[in-house]
Image (cartoon, helix red, strand yellow):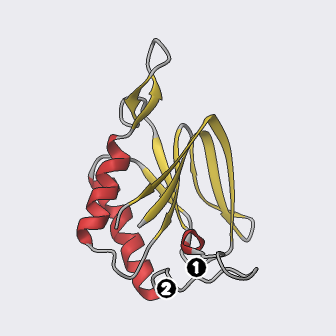
Amino acid sequence: MRCVVQRVSRAAVRVGGEAVGSIGRGFVVLAGFAPADSEATLVWMAEKLAGLRVFGDAEGKMNLGIGDVGGAMLVVSQFTLYGDASKGRRPSFVGAAPPEQAEALYERFVALLRGRGVPVETGRFRAMMDVELVNDGPVTLLLEHQ
């Protein structure tokens, strides 16, 4: 599983012009899934994200987690995180989980985050989405668990 995590002051996702999810302060999480991802993989990533301390404290140091600041997550599926452009000019996505498997992993991942008390909004799986965000920092992390 791979995630790109961006700390934001606000974000929204639209499908066909319709807002399907939006948050204020928190994380935009672009989540990609691989065929070998398991429940343990999803649990590890959910715990990692729920516990990340990347929000500033009173001294401006990254010491606070998403729960400490009353934040939320906007989780968007992103199979292109498994794109391999090392050969040729067109990326290959064979490393990504097939859509049916990825959708089940995505839904379970979102449920695990919500189970940790994190408010979660989502995009729409397999839809063409417009994601709009305002970076806070910017702070962007790449997380991976195999």
Residue 56 % position (x, y): 48, 23
- Residue positioned 31% across, 65% down in the render: 42
**Where does label 2 land, which residue?**
99
Q: Residues within 10 Å of mark 1 (few under 14, many from 20)?
A: few
Q: Residues within 10 Å of mark 2 (few under 14, many from 20)?
A: few
Q: Which mark is residue 126?
A: 1
Q: Quadrant of the C terminus?
A: bottom left
Q: How many labels sit on residues?
A: 2
Residue 84 sits in which quadrant? bottom right
Residue 143 sits in which quadrant? bottom left
- Residue positioned 64% across, 59% down in the render: 13
Q: Amino acid at mark 1?
A: Arg
Farthest residue, direction top: 59
Residue 37 sits in which quadrant? bottom left
Asked if residue 99 is positioned above or below residue 124 in the image, the reply reads below
Secondary structure of the residue carrying numbered label 2? helix
Which comes before the other along the chain, label 1 or label 2?
2
Viewer-closest of 68 and 119: 68
